[in-house]
Image: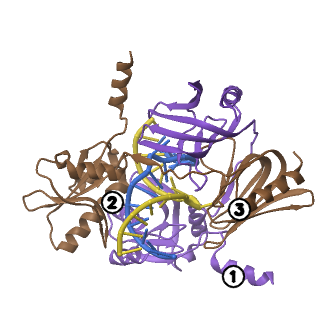
Chain colours: A purple, B brown, C blue, D yellow
DNA sequence: GGGGAGAGATGCCGC
DNA sequence: GCGGCATTTCTCCCC
């Protein structure tokens, strides 16, 4: 494609605030929170309604370079080369895309008022435990969930009816060392703020790493296998596959 | 655009393993690691060479739905509707995109052999400290960096020449409570593995939150302000702006 | 492949 | 705005 023509379409589409997708051969420089250089290659450049800018390589889930929403985006045509510039304040950062060749240019206004409805998050998991405390233990009596305190954020907090407090930390994925240190911090702070010593820590997660389990038991805490709700776990899938025949 | 024609192009491009961008009106269902529903709206559907599938809303930096690389992607035309299906094993997950209307279809083979070169990461920061130990203290003598041990990953490890070991944890951004708990875990494990008690913990970061600083000092650790190398910090920007006049 | 940890993380919510 | 924290995190690296 003729770069001058692409430049004109680009400026027009930026002014109209259209979504833009440009297939091109380019190089990318970024400087701001860090500093990066990406040599010449074929990429997909995307500009969204909110001035988010994404540069995607032909592979991979994440953009190789990007600028966040609210960026100032301009295009210039200098010395036969198309240059796309983007910048931001707070934090200051800037990007420059030198476009050597354009393969395709697409732009359009898109309208989307729907929001994603998502089930199976960690919050859904703590809600499930709050509503079904037996998932933790027969004696567990929840007092609060998602409690924001000065020292942290307790997923589920309660007691065992026998004088011990219980702090439950939920993870929707495999719990690791970081999850255990997080639980320890909460338990310590509950002990400190209530001036008591009988606080149990329980890790509720579908899996736990071997090192994390060791640290957990060393600290005197417990692991309770719990799966997040409404997600296909392995037994569901197996069942489903059997049923399909 | 005629959906049947788009379907044919889609199948052809999938078979040729081209990058695909489809502007369309659609709804999306996902089930696997979690479960989600996205009602009808205008979106951008992207299929990459490695079978990564991205669904982007007109706004926002992140895809609203996606399937990771290596997905099995198929298109079917049933009852006048175009349906894009994607699925994965380990973990099992599946996505269904019901396309009601297509606005544009673009596909092309893109070639990109260049890798991003990035400067200013946490590793660059620990390298800088290793090479300039005075950034931590006059007495700091580094012994190793990026040391992978059985109990964790020490950014910079050394001693003070006076019989105390020093563990430095680097953060390229503001250190929070999680950073402090991480440092504590490393210090404890070094004490345990070496059977000594004189191990100092030092947090090296451009900033630290007030709560994190309190926890740090309560633990007897120290905070040392260090900026990651080669990134524009505020004073640089100010200088630069003054110079521009 | 599991485990640990960073990321120019992003995004959400609460204060 | 900062802060704390989850994410269908993703990505990389080491074992």
Marks 3 and 1, how far apart at CA: 18 Å
Q: Nearer the viewer, residue A200 or A169?
A: A169
Question: Pointer 3: what residue?
Answer: B30
Q: Does dot 2 land on a helix, a strand or a loop?
A: helix
Q: Are marks 2 and 3 in contact (CB under 8 Å)?
A: no
**Mark 2 Cα shell of 10 Å, populated few (<14), some (14-19), many (≥20):** many
Q: Answer with mark 2 or mark 3, whichever residue precedes in sequence.
A: 3
Question: Pointer 1: what residue?
Answer: A238
Residue B176's mark? none
Q: Chain of mark 2?
A: B
Q: Position of residue B10 (x, y in %)?
A: 79, 55
Q: Nearer the viewer, residue B215 or A5?
A: A5
**Mark 3 Cα shell of 10 Å, populated few (<14), some (14-19), many (≥20):** many
Residue A162 visible here: no
Looking at the rendered structure, the number of numbered marks drawn on it comes to 3
Residue A52 falls in image quadrant: top right
Marks 2 and 3, how far apart at CA: 35 Å
Left or right: A153 in relation to B106: left
Question: Pointer 2: what residue?
Answer: B181
Q: Position of residue A1 (x, y in %)?
A: 70, 36
Q: Chain of mark 1?
A: A
Q: Are marks 2 and 1 on the same chain?
A: no
Which residue is found at the position 61% from the left and 34% from the top?
A51
**Mark 1 Cα shell of 10 Å, populated few (<14), some (14-19), many (≥20):** few
Question: Quadrant location of the N terminus of chain B?
Answer: top right
Q: Given the current orientation, which residue lies at the most extreme right position?
A: B79
Q: Are marks 2 and 3 on the same chain?
A: yes
Q: Position of residue B68 (x, y in %)?
A: 62, 62
């Amino acid at each position: 494609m003729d770069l001058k023509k692409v430049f004109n379409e680009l400026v027009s589409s930026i002014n109209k605030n259209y979504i833009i997708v440009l297939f091109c051969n380019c190089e990318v420089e970024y400087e701001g929170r860090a500093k990066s250089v990406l040599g010449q290659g074929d990429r997909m450049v995307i500009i969204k309604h909110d001035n988010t800018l994404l540069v995607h390589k032909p592979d991979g889930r994440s953009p190789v370079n990007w600028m966040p929403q609210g960026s100032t985006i301009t295009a210039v045509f200098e010395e036969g080369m198309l240059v796309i510039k983007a910048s931001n304040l707070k934090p200051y950062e800037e990007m420059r895309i030198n476009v050597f060749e354009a393969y395709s240019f697409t732009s359009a206004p898109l309208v989307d008022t729907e929001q994603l409805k998502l089930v199976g998050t960690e919050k859904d998991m703590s809600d499930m435990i709050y509503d079904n405390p037996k998932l933790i233990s027969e004696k567990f009596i929840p007092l609060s969930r998602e409690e924001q305190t000065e020292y942290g954020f307790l997923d589920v907090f309660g007691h065992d009816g026998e004088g011990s407090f219980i702090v439950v930390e939920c993870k929707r994925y495999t719990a690791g060392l970081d999850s255990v240190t997080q639980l320890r911090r909460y338990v310590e702070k509950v002990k400190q703020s209530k001036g008591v010593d009988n606080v149990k820590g329980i890790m509720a997660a579908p899996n736990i790493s071997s090192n994390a389990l060791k640290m957990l038991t060393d600290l005197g805490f417990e692991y309770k296998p719990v799966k997040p709700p409404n997600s296909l776990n392995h037994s569901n899938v197996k069942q489903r596959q059997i049923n399909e025949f």
